């Protein structure tokens, strides 16, 4: 199978490329290297079944050529990270909405299976836990910039489902929940790489608010298995799936476990939200996915427990620091 991965030089995309090549598939990566990094795919350059195009989704001729050769597309290219979204809302909207619009147009011309990455952010502030794919979505108002990301990804979902419904595009939406692991950058705000790096550098761990908000962290290797399981799966067409872990942890416990497992002497500092983020931010207290739908479809469930996730990230970051 020949798979086109948009955003393939990013954290999740590069792990997916590794896995697909390992199982004998061919992979084309399209990435403009805005948040992805050439380093992530360095080891793949020269592989006979791998190609890389440094281009944006607005480059129609490159996109059409790559989509035309693919048996499947995995669309991961997007503006990522809370900080980036708060600082550059216009760029976020353009990248996510116009990018996905262009991708879907190319996918329609090629007719190949398309997996679209969406996000747990679309559930917004819903308090109906665990979040299930048919739930109502509860977003905040547009003057709170945090919701830009959710709104753009939700529009992507609508665009994608419309392409499926009106033009028969075989297409599946994946709502990803706090995916973590080696190669993830902390530059744009993601908590786990940031806290791990702080612990290894002996700096205070910055926990925002009271630290009692919870998240469920899923190892990127598990997510890759879910994506691979959805490839070629015709019964998943027109469907939305949550992909994530349902092992809930408070950010406070997370920080304590990181200090412990990294053997760090760093203290934990609690930072009021007003100091942590630009105005317009509101945090979510809890986020837990219902993952029964994808389990029923492909028998997938996450296999990495939090302790293993933390050890992997600590090892990776330790090596990077030396
Ligand atoms: N967070 C934190 N310290 C940081 C970065 C994030 O305490 O240095 C908190 C953040 O406020 C949120 C949680 O960790 O409650 C997860 O944040 P992240 O940006 O990783 O993901 P998301 O908010 O999208 O779940």
Image (cartoon, grey):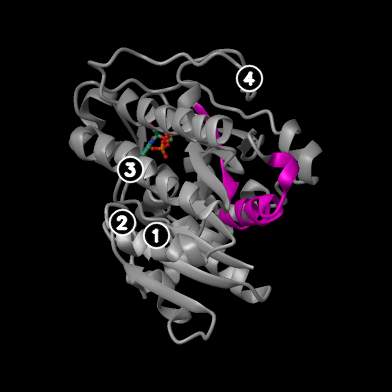
Q: Secondary structure at mark 1?
A: helix
Q: Residue 72, image x and y in percent?
A: 58, 57
- Mark 3 or mark 2: name the one nearer the start of the chain: 2
Give residue 189's mark. 3
Q: Residue at x 41, y 52 (%)?
A: 193
State the CA–CA distance, disc 1 to disc 3. Answer: 33 Å
Front tag of 2 and 4: 2
Specify start and end residues of the magenta stretch as a single range: 214-236
- Mark 4 or mark 3: name the one nearer the start of the chain: 4
Q: Secondary structure at mark 4?
A: loop
State the CA–CA distance, disc 2 to disc 1. Answer: 6 Å
Disc 2 packing (10 Å; few <14; some 14–19; many ≥20):
some
Q: Of residues 225 and 73, which is closer to you in this image?
A: 73
Mark 3 Cβ inside 8 Å of ligand 1: yes
Q: Which quarter of the picture shows residue 155?
A: top left
Q: Of residues 237 and 291, which is closer to you in this image?
A: 237
Disc 3 packing (10 Å; few <14; some 14–19; many ≥20):
some
Disc 1 packing (10 Å; few <14; some 14–19; many ≥20):
some
Write down the residue under mark 2. 60
| Labelled pair 2, 1 in contact (Cβ < 8 Å) | yes
């Amino acid at each position: 199978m020949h798979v086109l991965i948009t955003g393939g030089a990013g954290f999740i995309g590069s792990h997916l490329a590794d896995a697909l090549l390992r199982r004998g598939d061919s992979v084309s990566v399209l990435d403009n290297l805005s948040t992805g990094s050439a380093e992530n795919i360095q080891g793949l350059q020269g592989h006979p079944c791998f190609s890389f195009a440094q281009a944006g989704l607005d480059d129609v001729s490159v996109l059409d050529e790559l989509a035309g050769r693919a048996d499947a597309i995995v669309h991961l290219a997007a503006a990522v990270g809370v900080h980036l979204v708060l600082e550059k809302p216009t760029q976020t909207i353009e990248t996510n909405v116009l990018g996905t619009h262009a991708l879907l147009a190319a996918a329609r011309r090629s007719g190949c299976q398309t997996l679209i990455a969406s996000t747990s952010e679309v559930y917004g502030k819903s308090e109906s836990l665990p979040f299930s794919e048919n739930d109502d979505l509860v977003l905040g108002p547009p003057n709170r910039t945090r919701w830009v990301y959710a709104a753009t990804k939700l529009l992507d979902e609508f665009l994608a489902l419309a392409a499926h419904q009106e033009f028969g595009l075989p297409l599946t939406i994946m709502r990803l929940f706090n995916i973590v692991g080696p190669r993830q950058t902390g530059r744009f705000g993601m908590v786990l790489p940031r806290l791990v790096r702080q612990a290894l550098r002996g700096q205070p761990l910055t926990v925002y608010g009271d630290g009692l908000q919870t998240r469920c962290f899923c190892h990127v290797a598990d997510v890759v298995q879910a994506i691979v399981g959805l490839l070629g799966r015709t019964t998943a067409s027109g469907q939305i799936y949550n992909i994530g872990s349902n092992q809930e942890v408070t950010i406070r416990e997370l920080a304590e476990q990181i200090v412990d497992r990294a053997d760090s002497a760093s203290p934990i500092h609690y930072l009021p939200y007003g100091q942590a983020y630009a105005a317009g931010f509101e945090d979510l207290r809890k986020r837990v996915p219902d993952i029964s739908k994808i389990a029923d479809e492909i028998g997938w469930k996450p296999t990495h427990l939090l302790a293993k996730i933390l050890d992997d990230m600590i090892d990776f970051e330790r090596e990077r620091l030396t």
